[in-house]
Amino acid sequence: MAKGNGRFPPLNALRAFEAAARHSSFKLAAKELHVTPGAVSHQVKLLEEHLGVALFRRLTRALELTTEAHAMLPKVREGLEALQAAVERVRAREDMSSLTVVSPPNFAARWLVPRLSSFTAAHPNIELHIASRQSMVDTRGESAPLVSVKDTRADSPVAMVRFGSGHYPGSHVEEVFSAVYVPVCSPRLLKGDHPLRKPEDLRFHTLLHDDTVVEEGARPSWNDWLQSAGLTDIDATRGPHFSDAALAMDAAIEGMGVTLAIKPLLATEIEAKRLVVPFNIAAPTGYAYYLVTPESSSENRALTSFRKWLLDEAKPERIAATASRSS
């Protein structure tokens, strides 16, 4: 027999060898591989010539592996299984689709991410890419900016959750839920020398100001809220200011004071008893969260699935916001 020349053995020959070794039969191997027993025998002979060793002893009613065959069989099997796994991964990728979701940081951290596992469980073939950007909050009446290249993939449509007026020309726009602002604070502020029991008690506590949105009327100020509560003798300008809603909320969690926050974003913190709503009095606002998608992507499967899931998840918040506005 000729010695091997260093080239990789033919794949069909390796498959024939592995099947014949597993069944100890060319006939049964042929049945598995959907070829004739003669074809299996031919492939095994090619492999033996390539390697320069005998792999089987042909007995009357069976095949017996040689010492060389016993030595190489586990690695051949391992290699074929690895190759099969690689092929299956490629096939699985063909069924995958991707979607980039960009939203404001506070919305992403406190509303979207805590609910996201239900979407990924229902849609395992959709690969999500989540990005949080402060640019998703409208400022000074700006329309929706282009999403940064680093937030996108060439094969991935983009769904933006915008916090703003809802005016985004050239895009498909749907309201997720409107912003209903209520006062929130640490449960510790309900106790102590000046417990928060009625709105008037705010005069004894620090007011925390969220300056994320500077557009007049877009979000309520403490002055707006105090007027809604019928209070005119409390200084609404005192207290520290924060450029990020998440920072203002974190300060409230630490017991630093009371801030105005969007009620639908509070569920996790309230459930964990890190925050409470001392007075369920809402202040008016001109902003809401909107799902903004390219009109050209309306038929994309991943985008359609995410849109339905997001709007279904937010339905209780939309109903509650409507009830709050009408009360």
Image: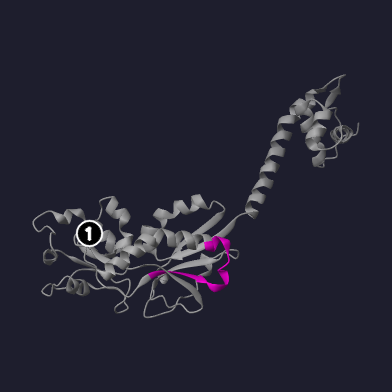
> Any magenta on residue 185?
no
Please provide percent x and percent y for residue 282. 24, 68
User: Which residue is found at the position 71% from the left and 30% from the top?
Assistant: 74
User: Which residue is found at the position 41% from the left and 54% from the top?
Assistant: 115
Front in this rendered view, residue 197 or 5: 197
Which amino acid does the dot numbered 1 rest on? Answer: Val
What range of the chain is rendered magenta?
Answer: 289-304
Side of 65 where 122 appears, left or right: left
Front in this rendered view, residue 274 or 82: 274
Side of 41 where 162 appears, left or right: left
Please provide percent x and percent y for residue 280. 21, 62
Q: Quadrant of residue 200?
A: bottom left
> Any magenta on residue 293?
yes
Please provide percent x and percent y for residue 276. 23, 56
The residue tagged 1 is 277
Q: How many marks?
A: 1
User: Which residue is found at the position 21% from the left and 56% from the top?
Assistant: 186
Q: Is residue 112 visible?
A: yes
Front in this rendered view, residue 127 or 253: 127
For residue 18, above or below residue 170: above
